[in-house]
Image: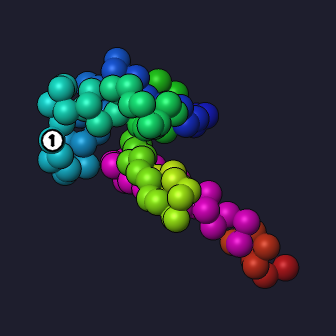
Amino acid sequence: MSRSVRASTPADAPAIKALFAATGLQPNADSRSLQWKYWQERSDWSAPRSFVLTGGEEIVAHGAIVPGAFLFGEERITTAHVIVGALTLATTFWLTWRAHRDLLETSAPA
């Protein structure tokens, strides 16, 4: 099964809510809150703020960016905090394997 990361859309809200529930999370996930957090336009951030990892048609992980900024002298520096919202257990194992695959393959005894 191929996996891909893409920006979420308001049409993903039911699947994101279901993923939160399936992973035991209870965030403020009413429709208006999700719209405000993830999809409402902001004058200081034009890029997407919510992302999903899909396995086929199924959403198996959700993460978000919380944009911010700070002033450094006269310069405004844009920042972003990455938040991993929810992962299925199978996705957790898959991501862990992907992150360590090269290390495991190169350190295996010959």
- Front in this rendered view, residue 10 or 67: 67
Tell me what residue is drawn at x 15 percent, y 47 percent. 26
Q: Is residue 108 above or below residue 92?
A: below
- Name of the residue lying farthest toward the front: 74
Q: Is residue 99 left or right of residue 30?
A: right
Q: Nearer the viewer, residue 74 or 1?
A: 74
* Residue at 67% over, 63% down: 101
The image quadrant that residue 17 belongs to is top left
Query: Is residue 43 visible to us here?
Result: yes
| 105 sits to left or right of 93 | right
- Name the element at disc 1: loop
x and y, in percent, of residue 4 in the image: 58, 35
Where is residue 27 drawn, in percent x and y? 17, 46
> Which residue lies at the image location 47% right of the left edge and 24% below the top edge?
57
Q: Is residue 105 left or right of residue 81?
A: right
Specify the color scheme: rainbow
Above or below 62: residue 10 = above
In the rendered image, residue 42, in percent from the top left (x then y), is placed at 39, 31
Q: Is residue 63 above or below residue 94?
A: above
- Give neighbour class at mark 1: few <14, some 14-19, many 20+ (Cα, 10 Å): few
* Quarter of the image with the C terminus in it: bottom right
Q: Which residue is mark 1?
A: 28
Q: Point out the image quarter for the N terminus.
A: top right
Q: Amino acid at mark 1?
A: Asn
Q: Nearer the viewer, residue 29 or 95?
A: 29
Residue 60 found in image quarter: top left
Residue closest to the eye, 16 or 105 = 16
Q: Which residues are magenta?
A: 81-103
Magenta portion: prevailing SS class: helix
Q: Residue at x 46, y 36 (%)?
A: 45
| Residue at the farthest top position | 11
